[in-house]
Amino acid sequence: MIMDKMHMTRGLLLCLVVLSTLGCEEAVDPVLSTDEAYTLYGFLDPTSDRQAIRIFSIDGVLERTRNEPMDAIVRSVNARTGETVSWRDSVVVFDDLSLGHVFHAPFRADFDTPYTLSVTASDGRSTSVDVRTPPDGEARIVDIASARSQVVIHLEWSSVPRLLQTQVSYHVRVPFPDRSDTTTTRVDIRSGRVEENGDGTWRVYIIPSGDLGIVFGALGLQPGRDPIFLDRVEVRAFVTSADWVSPVGSFDPELLVQPGTFSNVQDGFGFVGGGYFDRFEFEMEEQDERNAGFSVE
């Protein structure tokens, strides 16, 4: 469970914050002439029972992370209830074989709640960040534009500060080679267009007819020869706190990785926000499935 959460934290920070050099010590943890002690990256997830934040120590000498506990005491405080949680250190080996300190704590953050996360060194230096988790959002289908070979589904998320990205999962059935039966599988696609409405809601457009070619390719099947039956569609939207906004207008890793550029941390560097994946599932009408190119029994 801890390792899954750590991998998710790293993956989301790479994909959403687009700090593509996060695993490189020299890129994120440079030698700085500063009194700041730490750099923090991560987010509080109100849908998870375990939280995780990656922490870098700001040192005067450039060196690789060592496989030993970091000199840091990490605590989070729920500003609404006063509940204080102590976090534990763990040294993680990432996919690029680099080492990193990921502090974790077994608690579920509350929706729409302010938290303060503090990191304190033995010499008294301290880094902190104020985070507000986003509220629990609501999603619905607004309309479906359906014509032959062109299906566009318009969804809307309300009561959320911001949506950063979407992922569409197609739950489908495909026949065995001898056509004796079918098997169920799922294809995940980074798909969907996110736009903000003038009233503060967020609209998401997904195009199943355009995604179908990717589904065929992922399953190694051929259109016109192999049938694919659609069971349901799952849209996962990453909901974030309102401050998760790039100061340069885009998530360019060459710009955002510079210390202090994309930061809400006090007496330190980095970014810690609030975020979670909200899921919305639905089934399509047979005619819409047919128009999108799926097979219909």
Image (tube, rainbow, N blue to C red):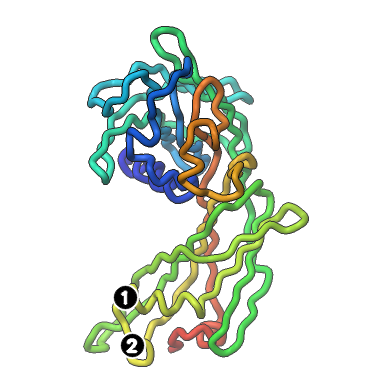
Residue found at x 52% / y 46% = 276
Percent from the top left, x then y, of residue 70?
A: 32, 20
Q: Which residue is mark 1?
A: 219
Q: Secondary structure at mark 2?
A: loop
Q: What is the quadrant of the C terminus in the image?
A: bottom left
Q: Is residue 193 above or below residue 31?
A: below
Sequence-wise, which precedes: disc 1 or disc 2? 1
Place residue 53 in its image quadrant. top left
Percent from the top left, x then y, of residue 183?
A: 30, 76
Q: Is residue 217 above or below residue 2?
A: below
Residue found at x 66% / y 46% = 161
Circles 1 and 2: CB distance less than 8 Å? yes
- From the viewer's perspective, tell me whether residue 113 is left or right of residue 229: right
Residue type (three-letter) at the residue carrying disc 2: Asp
Residue found at x 65% / y 57% = 157
* Crowd band around label 1 with a 10 angstrom C-alpha radius: few (<14), some (14–19), many (20+): few
Q: What is the quadrant of the N terminus in the image?
A: top left
Percent from the top left, x then y, of residue 26?
A: 34, 33
Please state which of residues 44 and 165 is positioned toward the viewer in this rendering: 165
Residue type (three-letter) at the residue carrying disc 1: Leu
Q: Which residue is mark 2?
A: 226
* Crowd band around label 2 with a 10 angstrom C-alpha radius: few (<14), some (14–19), many (20+): some
